[in-house]
Amino acid sequence: AQTVTQSQPEMSVQEAETVTLSCTYDTSENNYYLFWYKQPPSRQMILVIRQEAYKQQNATENRFSVNFQKAAKSFSLKISDSQLGDTAMYFCAFMMPITGTASKLTFGTGTRLQVTL
Amino acid sequence: GAVVSQHPSWVICKSGTSVKIECRSLDFQATTMFWYRQFPKQSLMLMATSNEGSKATYEQGVEKDKFLINHASLTLSTLTVTSAHPEDSSFYICSARDRDNYGYTFGSGTRLTVV
C-alpha cells in the first residue's frame, strides 16, 4: 500500500517570502500521479498543482512549483511571493491510475501554513 | 471548470435519527465519487468509493450499514448516516474525478453535528 508523509505539521512564512513544504511517499509503482491540495479555513479542497511521475520536468503553476525527485520519492511544494490568501492546510496526495476506473487518492497528514504580515 | 455541489453545508440532528448528504456533479458525469470524513485538524480519511449503478466499496473499518451510499445516476451520489450518534459528528466531503482527468474536484463539505 502507498503511504504519504508530510513531516511538517505547521509552518509560518512572512508575506512576499518563499516557503517550501515537504512530502515523501512510498510506492513500488512506476506510473503514478502526485498532487498538492490546499484547504483554506472555508474547508473547500482546492487543487494547487499536479505532477505525473513519467514527466521529469517539475510542474509549475504561477507562484507554485514542485521539486519532484522520483528516485528519492520526494515531492516538495514551493510557494513564492507568499500571500495572506495562501494561509491554509496543504495536503500532499498520491494516486496510482487504474485503467477503466477512477483511482482513489491517498493523502498525507497535512501541513498548516500561516502567512504573516 | 468541473463543479461538485454538496449539501447541506451543515446539519444538526438528534441522536438516533438519519441524515442524508447529497453530492452532485454539475457539469460533468461522474461514474465514481468518493466520500471522505475529516476530523478537526486532521487529514481526509476515505470512507468509501461510490460507483454509479453498483454497490459502493467501503474502506476497512467503515460500517456499511451505518453509512449508506447510493449512486443512482451519473450526477448524484448520496451518503446517509443512519441512527446517528454524537461520535458520528464530523466533516464529510465528497469528490469526483474531473472530466478532463486532470484531478479530483471536491464538494464544499458537510459539517454534521449529532446532539
Image (tube, coloured by chain):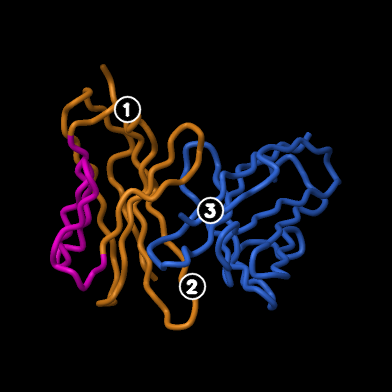
Chain colours: A orange, B blue
- The residue identified by callout 3 is B3
Q: Are marks 1 and 3 on the same chain?
A: no
In the image, residue A6 above or below residue A56: above
Closest to the observer, B82 or A98: A98
Q: CA distance from mark 1 to mark 3?
A: 27 Å
Q: Amino acid at mark 1?
A: Gln
Please provide percent x and percent y for residue A14: 21, 23
Give the residues in magenta: A52-80
Q: CA distance from mark 2 to mark 3?
A: 17 Å
Residue A102 is marked as: 2
Subunit bearing disc 2: A
Closest to the observer, A80 or A98: A80
- The residue identified by callout 1 is A114
Which label lies toward us, 2 or 3?
A: 3
Quarter of the N terminus of chain A within the rendering:
bottom left
Q: Residue at x 29, y 70 (%)?
A: A27
